[in-house]
Image (cartoon, rainbow, N blue to C red):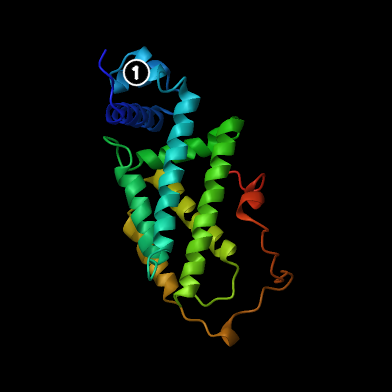
């Protein structure tokens, strides 16, 4: 029997993941059966189950792959001199994942899929752990990038790097939610909005005081990206 090349195996795995992602995005994770996935990818049950034992493994693989790619993009950016600014980097990453990630799907597909992954973590502990690990990795990568901004002289605010990292992640999460719920949200809108906020220049003596009754004391910095997210942030 001829030996199957690794390239062929990787291509077949990619075919299955793309097909499953289209199905989950189109009809929902729970409404999609493995038979639906088989029909979408045009493969036999044996061919698919050789790679994945069921829907849970498929959705976990999709989530892990996405986090790995996103973290890789941030880590690469942190090594650039100077590093790309948040509007450029977030725009590039979101454009890749919302418009190009799922072959043959519409631009809302991956956003809808991400929302489904978030909700599925409420009942699937293994997926929740995968998501928490991915979120920890993104926080660490963004924190390194924020430090790179400081070293390059692009960021002067005396704010903990992890706080900036979490805010930027929240910005991306909010944009994904808008795309999933309302559609037709151009990435350029996010880029322009971030660029506008980045252009603000507020003198230190002009920073407004906190409203009456609001405690403006800074909260302690989380001891680590890994430990802080466990049980605190349900989504990644």
Left or right of 136: which side holds 232? right
* Residue at 58% in and 31% down: 126
* Residue at 41% in and 17% down: 49
Q: Quadrant of the N terminus?
A: top left
Determine whether the residue tagged by mark 1 lies in a helix, strand or loop: helix
User: Looking at the image, which is closer to me, 6 or 147?
Assistant: 6
Is 65 located above or below residue 44 in the figure? Answer: below
Residue 152 in the image: state x and y as whole percent.
Answer: 44, 75
User: Looking at the image, which is closer to me, 223 or 94?
Assistant: 223
Is 127 located above or below residue 166 in the figure? Answer: above
Is 65 located above or below residue 186 in the figure? Answer: above
Residue 51 in the image: state x and y as whole percent.
Answer: 40, 23
Residue 116 in the image: state x and y as whole percent.
Answer: 48, 35
User: Looking at the image, which is closer to me, 213 or 22?
Assistant: 22
Residue 172, can we see it? yes
* Residue at 54% in and 55% down: 139
Residue 181, can we see it? no
Left or right of 217: which side holds 202? left
Residue 69 in the image: state x and y as whole percent.
Answer: 40, 46
Q: Which residue is mark 1?
A: 38
* Residue at 45% in and 54% down: 172
Left or right of 100: which side holds 129? right
């Amino acid at each position: 029997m001829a030996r199957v090349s690794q390239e062929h195996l990787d291509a077949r795995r990619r075919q299955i993941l793309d097909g499953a992602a289209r199905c989950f995005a189109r009809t929902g994770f729970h409404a999609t059966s493995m038979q639906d996935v088989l029909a979408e990818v045009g493969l036999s049950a044996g061919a698919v189950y050789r790679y994945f034992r069921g829907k849970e493994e498929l959705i976990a693989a999709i989530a892990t792959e996405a986090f790995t790619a996103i973290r890789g993009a941030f880590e690469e950016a942190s090594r650039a001199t100077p590093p790309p600014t948040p509007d450029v980097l977030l725009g590039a990453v979101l454009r890749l994942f919302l418009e190009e990630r799922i072959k043959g799907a519409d631009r809302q597909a991956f956003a809808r899929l991400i929302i489904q992954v978030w909700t599925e973590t409420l009942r699937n502990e293994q997926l929740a752990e995968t998501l928490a690990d991915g979120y920890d990795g993104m926080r660490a990568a963004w924190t390194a990038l924020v430090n790179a901004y400081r070293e390059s002289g692009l960021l002067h605010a005396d704010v903990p790097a992890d706080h900036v990292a979490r805010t930027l992640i929240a910005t991306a999460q909010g944009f994904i939610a808008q795309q999933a719920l309302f559609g037709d949200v151009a990435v350029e809108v996010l880029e322009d909005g971030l660029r506008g906020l980045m252009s603000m220049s507020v003198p230190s003596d002009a920073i407004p005081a906190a409203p009456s009754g609001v405690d403006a004391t800074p909260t302690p910095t989380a001891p680590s990206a890994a430990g802080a997210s466990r049980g605190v942030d349900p989504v990644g």
